[in-house]
Image (cartoon, rainbow, N blue to C red):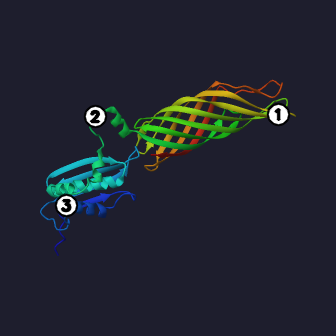
Amino acid sequence: MTPPATPAIEIQWEAPAPCPDATRVRAATERLLGKSLSGLEQTSVRATGKVTANAAGQWQLRTLLVVGERVEEEVLVARQCSSLADAMALKVALAIDPVAVVEAVQSSQPSAAAKIAPESPPPAPGPRSSNAQRVSFGARVVGQVALGPLPGTTPGVAALVSAQWPSFRVELGGEAFWGGVANYEALPAIGADLQLFAGMARACLTPATGAFRFPICAGPELGVMRGRGFGTAETSSTTGLWGGLALGPALEWRATSRLSLWLEGDAVLTLLKPEFHVRNLPSLYAPPTVAARAAAGLEAHF
């Protein structure tokens, strides 16, 4: 029995669920050619495409195109996975019948594949357009546990926004800690509840491998520490200026192109130390010079 003949046009397409499937890629190729691939026997074309999410949060397509004795390999990236499917269809159609493709393009609007950029694009006309292509943005929310600058171990939260480049990022955000309680040793019923609210600005180096990044961040923090006394007939609240410098490593795992898991540990050097006391009693509390904290949360990418 004679084995079935290998199709003259073979398209292999592998992509995650959000992307178009192989049927759509084949249909797009036929639309560009204006004819079915099943009847094409004079041209031998074999195309393979595999789509994955890269570390920059974009979709990446690796293609292998074999036309007769000619072999071509290329890597393309795009924000939309559908654009990569269009690019794959365009490459295959051009390999089969470039004249038919030109006629189809001239009679319709440009394909979304025109938005595809090679992984190593040529220099743009000016630095502004080059930077615009490489920068992305993120927003992160984390829960924290801190040892200092409040008394004892205290919980906290932080929210940050960031601008990100392939190996560098800058961040702005705010944080809050609460639950710190200070007591006089000789008068344990008298003390104060303390809270901290601060803003931060940070710069981070972001070495990466695969879906993991290893940010190393440093920057100043400035805010207010608020204390409310207890244990006396008359109590009051006091607010003092607090400031410090934070430095620490983090681990970012890019779970999807739009979402990352973030783990971080910081050391904080306190530079501005407010001092608290209750009424006419001696000093109750001042922040330590060095504090430590750990954070975990999620970051969304845009």
**Residue receiving disc 2:** 125
In the image, is 1 to the left or to the right of 15?
A: left
CA separation, marks 3 and 1? 83 Å
Quadrant in the picture for residue 142: top right
Mark found first going from the N terminus, 1 or 2? 2
Amino acid type shown at disc 3: Leu
Near-viewer residue (1 or 54): 54
Query: Which is in the foreground here, disc 2 or disc 3?
Result: 2
The mark found on residue 235 in the picture is: 1
**Residue receiving disc 3:** 33
- Numbered circles on residues, count: 3
Mark found first going from the N terminus, 2 or 3? 3
Q: Position of residue 219 (x, y in %)?
A: 53, 29
In the image, is 156 to the left or to the right of 76?
A: right
Which residue does the image show at 64% across and 37% down from the upper left? 146
In the image, is 99 to the left or to the right of 84?
A: left
Task: Give neighbour class at mark 1: few <14, some 14-19, many 20+ (Cα, 10 Å).
Answer: few
Circle 3 SS class: helix
Amino acid type shown at disc 2: Pro
- Image quarter hosting the N terminus: bottom left
Circle 1 SS class: loop
Relative to 172, say whether 96 is above or below: below
CA separation, marks 2 and 3? 34 Å
